[in-house]
Image: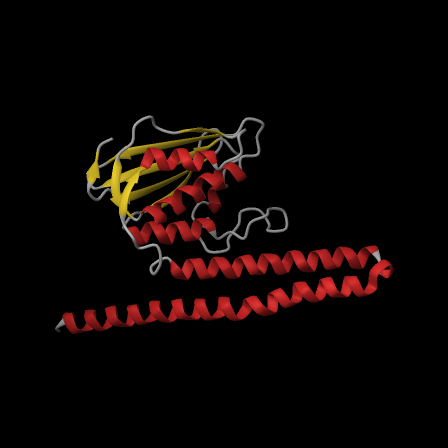
Amino acid sequence: MDMEPHAAACSKQLEQLKKDFEEFAYIVSHDMKAPVRAIVNLSQWIEEDLGDHLPPDVKHNMDLLRNRAFRLERMIEALLQYSRVSRYDLETGPTDLLELLLALKAELPPHVQVDVPAELPVLLTYKAKLRQVLSQLLQNASFFTQKDRPKIIVRVQEQAEFLLFEVTDNGDGIPAEALSKVFTLFYTVCPKDKVDTVGAGLAISKKTVQFAGGTIEALANEPEGTTIRFTWPKGPLTNT
């Protein structure tokens, strides 16, 4: 049995499914934004109409309504970003890793200690995509490190064809049963009512890393904290 035509047909079908999903996500995200925004506006107009006659419990429910609407809006935006990974930010250029990490470090709250390697290479790669992944991991580590002295350590190890990145924090960590789920779109370890996140950042990061040709995983640290480890193709390298 000749497998080549079958493989070609499967590949073509896979590409069509991918295209259909991207179109679906794009259409859904754009068409859903308008009614979500209308819900927010209507709730505000109702409050204005009631004025001083608005009972406290109704005010509370209106606030909850808007909170859920804003969350849905962020989920829609995340879905759009997820569908765009293979279509946007495809420009490649020289990327100074040390400069990039120091810039991302400056975006975090000043009380968060971030250790980065003193010497790092410059590589030719998808600069915007690599920046997005590293930014998400640093922001996640900062957000979920509920300590008086939060600390994040970034390690970069050169391998034959890849760079191995590790972003380690000293937070409460991720339960063992959740380590394989944290890269699922909209999954959160804590209930969404308790954390201000929609659970999309790691899913988008995983899709971005895989698009670039790398892998990503979450590891539990001992005695505390989490490490996110991912590989990224080196491409042409220039030593700093």
Q: Is residue 11 left or right of residue 228?
A: left
Q: Residue furthest right?
A: 53
Q: Is residue 14 above or below residue 161?
A: below
Q: Where residue 114 appears, x then y in whole percent?
A: 45, 29
- The reply to whether residue 34 is visible in this rendering is yes
What is the quadrant of residue 64 in the picture? bottom right
Q: Where residue 81 appears, x then y in whole percent?
A: 44, 58
Q: Is residue 214 left or right of residue 204?
A: left
Q: Which residue is drawn at 65% across and 56% down?
A: 67
Q: Where residue 69 appears, x then y in whole percent?
A: 62, 61
Which sits in the foreground, 92 or 223?
Answer: 92
What is the quadrant of residue 53 in the picture? bottom right
Q: In this view, does 235 lie to the left or right of 36?
A: left
Which corner quadrant holds the N terminus? bottom left
Q: Residue at x 47, y 42 (%)?
A: 176
Q: Is residue 231 above or below residue 147?
A: below
Which sits in the foreground, 166 or 138?
Answer: 138
Q: Which residue is drawn at 59% across and 48% down?
A: 196
Model colouring: secondary structure
Which sits in the foreground, 93 or 23?
Answer: 93
